[in-house]
């Protein structure tokens, strides 16, 4: 077998194993650091609501940052959002700079990825906060997710791929932490 095919197979195995490794790490952290008790549905404590508020505010800041940097990129490179804006400006979209289009695509991709992850986070966070989790688990997983998303946005916008991978892993770890905590609390 030639080297490029072997390398692709190795990379494919890493890609397939990656979420399972994060899930196992999240499970281990939950079992070793936070302790899991049988699920009890109740109103969340003030500390857990506070963690959810902090995470929510950080996620709103992240959204505003993505929105703002997208619009500033459009302004800098004379790009428009809709066919109507292009027509009104008198600028031909085909004349847009390749760099400008790449930078706009970077911001769109960061925004899409953030939105995709936020959907699952919101669902998990809503369930998590009403199932009597430990306060420390709530603070780590909820606030940790939001901080990781800020780091992801910074890394993506700055073109720092290795750092982006670290922050993506941390945000996924937080989601897997939330999910595994919920699952474990059903069976403990």
Image: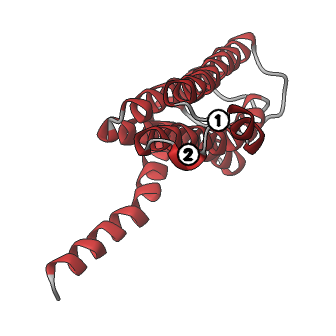
Is residue 7 visible in the rendered image? The answer is: yes
Q: Which residue reaches farthest bottom?
A: 1
Give coordinates of residue 6: x percent, y percent: 21, 78
Residue 116 vertical position relative to residue 158 in the rendered view, above or below: below
Residue 2 x/y as whole percent: 15, 85
Left or right side of 12 for 65: right
115 relative position to 6: left or right = right
Residue at the disc numbered 1: 80
Q: Quadrant of the N terminus?
A: bottom left
Q: Residues within 10 Å of mark 1 (few under 14, many from 20)?
A: some
Q: Quadrant of residue 5?
A: bottom left
Q: Earlier in the sequence, mark 2 or mark 1?
A: 1
Report the residue at 36% width, 38% height from top: 166
Q: Secondary structure at mark 2?
A: helix
Give the number of marks: 2
Q: Quadrant of residue 3?
A: bottom left
Q: Classify 35 as above or below 61.
A: below
Front one among 70 and 164: 70
Q: Nearer the viewer, residue 61 or 13?
A: 61
> What residue lies at 78% left-to-right and 40% top-to-bottom?
84
Q: Which residue is mark 2?
A: 176
Q: Residue placed at 45% from the left, 51% from the top? A: 24
Dot 1 lies on which element? Answer: loop
- Farthest-out residue, front: 90
Question: Cα distance, mark 2 to mark 1?
Answer: 38 Å
Pointers 2 and 1 in contact (CB under 8 A)? no
Of the pair 127 and 91, the residue shown nearer to us? 91
Q: Quadrant of residue 125?
A: top right
Relative to 62, residue 159 above or below: below
Q: Position of residue 43 (x, y in %)?
A: 84, 22
């Amino acid at each position: 077998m030639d080297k490029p095919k072997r390398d692709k197979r190795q990379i494919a195995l890493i890609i397939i194993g990656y979420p399972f490794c994060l899930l196992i790490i999240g499970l281990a952290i939950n079992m070793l650091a936070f302790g899991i008790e049988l699920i009890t549905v109740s109103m969340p404590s003030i500390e857990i609501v506070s963690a959810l508020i902090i995470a929510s505010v950080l996620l709103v800041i992240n959204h505003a940052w993505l929105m703002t940097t997208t619009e500033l990129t459009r302004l800098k490179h004379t790009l428009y959002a809709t066919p109507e804006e292009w027509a009104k400006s008198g600028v031909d979209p085909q004349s847009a700079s390749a760099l400008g289009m790449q930078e706009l695509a970077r911001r769109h991709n960061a925004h899409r990825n953030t939105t995709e992850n936020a959907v699952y986070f919101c669902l998990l966070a809503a369930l998590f906060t009403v199932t009597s989790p430990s306060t420390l688990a709530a603070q780590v997983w909820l606030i940790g997710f939001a901080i990781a998303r800020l780091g992801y946005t910074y890394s993506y916008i700055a073109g720092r791929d290795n750092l982006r991978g670290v922050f993506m892993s941390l945000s996924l770890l937080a989601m897997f932490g939330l999910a595994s905590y919920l699952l474990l609390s059903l069976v403990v």
